Amino acid sequence: MRVIAGSAGGVRLAVPKRGVRPTMDRVKAAIFSSLGDAIVGARVLDLFAGTGALGIEALSRGASSAVFVEESRQSVEVLEKNLTKTKLKGRIRNQDVFDFLRKASNSESYQIIFADPPYEKTKHGERYTETLLNNEALPRLLEPSGMFVLEKRPDETVAEMKLWRVVTKRTYGATEVLFLSQSAIK
């Protein structure tokens, strides 16, 4: 796994021995191709950051800042190494994503939010994707013209969403990527 383009293009990223499912390079390339110039100067939030590959790619391509939220201490250590290796700077929150969203300040907003949640279910038996899509704090963190990029399994169905509108969705092998904007209905 590597940074594809920008100031850190070609740098290989470290990956923890277990516990993460990094975004494949071809999926990452497709995501950033779809985002185009929207990434330049953007404030980025990377939820379930893992290795930090999405936020680091954004920084490498000109995002102005990135906040990485990751619960696993092992993944955070790898993320710190990856930021050092790429000579990029970002804020890391070693915290559960839903706890972060509960406590997030409404004064901080982002133009792009990435989320690559685990495919398995939460401790309470819900699917991460569904829990994230129904979290009312998340859309408040996204600027009105911003984009929420969510990775999920292609066979995972998503119930009707009240908070989000699907702009486009694409499938790349074992990954489906949803590009979402805030729903007009709040």
Image (cartoon, rainbow, N blue to C red):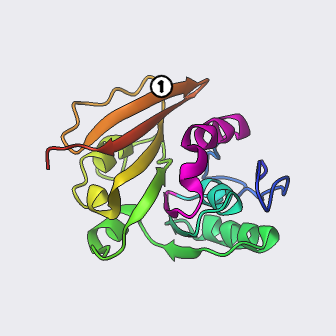
Q: Is residue 77 above or below residue 125?
A: below
Q: Is residue 163 above or below residue 112?
A: above
Q: Is residue 36 above or below residue 143?
A: above
> Quick one: SS at disc 1?
loop
Q: Residue at x 34, y 44 (%)?
A: 181
Res. 125 in view: no
Q: Residue at x 23, y 36 (%)?
A: 161
Q: Residue at x 74, y 66 (%)?
A: 82
Magenta span has 29? Answer: yes
- Residue 18 image position (x, y, % from top left): 66, 52
Magenta region, main secondary structure: helix
Q: Which residue is mark 1?
A: 154
Q: What range of the chain is rendered magenta?
A: 24-48
Magenta span has 160? Answer: no
Amino acid type shown at disc 1: Pro
- Residue 175 image position (x, y, % from top left): 55, 31
Q: Quadrant of residue 100?
A: bottom left
- Residue 111 image position (x, y, % from top left): 43, 59
